[in-house]
Image: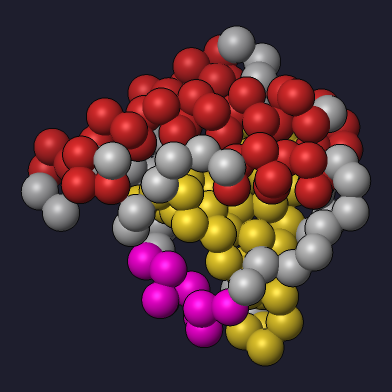
Amino acid sequence: MNDARANESAIGTMSRADKGPLAPPPVLDEPLKSVADAIAGWHGIITTAHWDLFDTSRVDGIDFYYGELELGHIHLDGSVHLATNPELGRALIREGLGKAFPYQRGWVHENVRRIGAPAAIALFQRNYERLLTMSPAAN
């Protein structure tokens, strides 16, 4: 990734293949299902199982990609992790819509069960709109 693109993405984003075996996403309960269904319906979004980082034999949620660009994921416990860029991440935090992810720069986190499905969808929407401008090949 060139220097300009490095500033457009969160640190620690991974290709779909590097996250573990490609597999169908799990069936989620509400309100997670409403969020996942909304995002999965957006043009160019690819969904796959999100594997536990420390146990790649255990599914821990659903990943969302726009082409090969990581949008974010939802864990089974309702945690949302968004792979924003630093600028969008700061804006979401400043607006009180998300919290800084403590483990990687450029990521924002929240919990669907705390903020509700509409707010979680809005978070993903902001990041999706950013990705739309980055990857014309996925359009």
Residue 17 on the magenta span: yes
Q: Eyeballing the image, is 116 above or below 64?
A: above
Q: Eyeballing the image, is 78 above or below 98?
A: below
81 or 104: nearer the eye? 81
Q: Is residue 24 visible?
A: yes
Q: Is residue 104 visible?
A: no
Q: Eyeballing the image, is 46 above or below 90?
A: below
Q: Residue 36 placed where, x, y %?
A: 69, 47
Q: Residue 29 placed where, x, y %?
A: 89, 54
Q: Is residue 95 left or right of residue 37?
A: left
Q: Is residue 67 left or right of residue 7?
A: right
Residue at 81 percent of width and 27 percent of height: 115
Q: Eyeballing the image, is 63 above or below 11?
A: below
74 or 36: nearer the eye? 36
Q: Which residues are magenta?
A: 15-23
Residue at 58 percent of width and 78 percent of height: 23
- Quarter of the picture holding the C terminus: top left
Q: Residue furthest left?
A: 2
Q: Residue furthest top?
A: 95
Q: Is residue 87 left or right of residue 63?
A: left
Residue at 42 percent of width and 68 percent of height: 16
Q: Residue 13 placed where, x, y %?
A: 40, 56
Residue at 40 percent of width and 47 percent of height: 44
Residue 72 on the magenta span: no
106 or 70: nearer the eye? 70
- Quarter of the picture holding the N terminus: bottom left
Magenta segment, prevailing SS (helix, strand or loop): loop
